[in-house]
Amino acid sequence: MRPDLAVDRDGIGIRFGHFHSRRLSEALGLADGGGVVGASMAHDNTIKEVDRLRLSLDRALSG
């Protein structure tokens, strides 16, 4: 399942792709897998929100 759809079930919005860095994704061997995951964080995110994101990504990656 796509990572953005998996965490969407938990009410978390992320994006994935190459983020204008296709050559970097290729150099890191990530291009064939769709690139990288991007999550926007800011100074006002709480530890609880960060933990929620981490747990959601753990579930998405385990599958």
Image: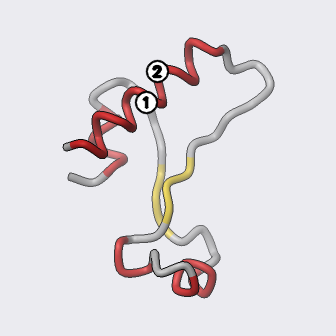
Using the rendered view, name the quadrant where residue 19 is placed. bottom right
For label 1, the SS is loop
Of the image marks 1 and 2, the number of the one nearer the N terminus:
1
| Residue 52 picture location, percent across and down | 46, 21
For the residues marked 1 and 2, what is the alpha-carbon distance in whole angstroms? 9 Å
- CB contact under 8 Å: marks 1 and 2: yes
Q: Position of residue 6 (x, y in %)?
A: 27, 40
Which quadrant would the C terminus be assigned to in this image?
Answer: top left
Query: Which amino acid, mark 2?
Result: Arg
Judged left or right of residue 34, residue 38 is right
Identify which residue is drawn at 56% across, 12% down. Answer: 48
Residue of label 1: 12
- Identified by mark 1, the residue type is Ile
| Residue at 58% from the left image edge and 24% from the top image edge | 50
- Residue topped by disc 2: 52
- Local secondary structure at mark 2: helix
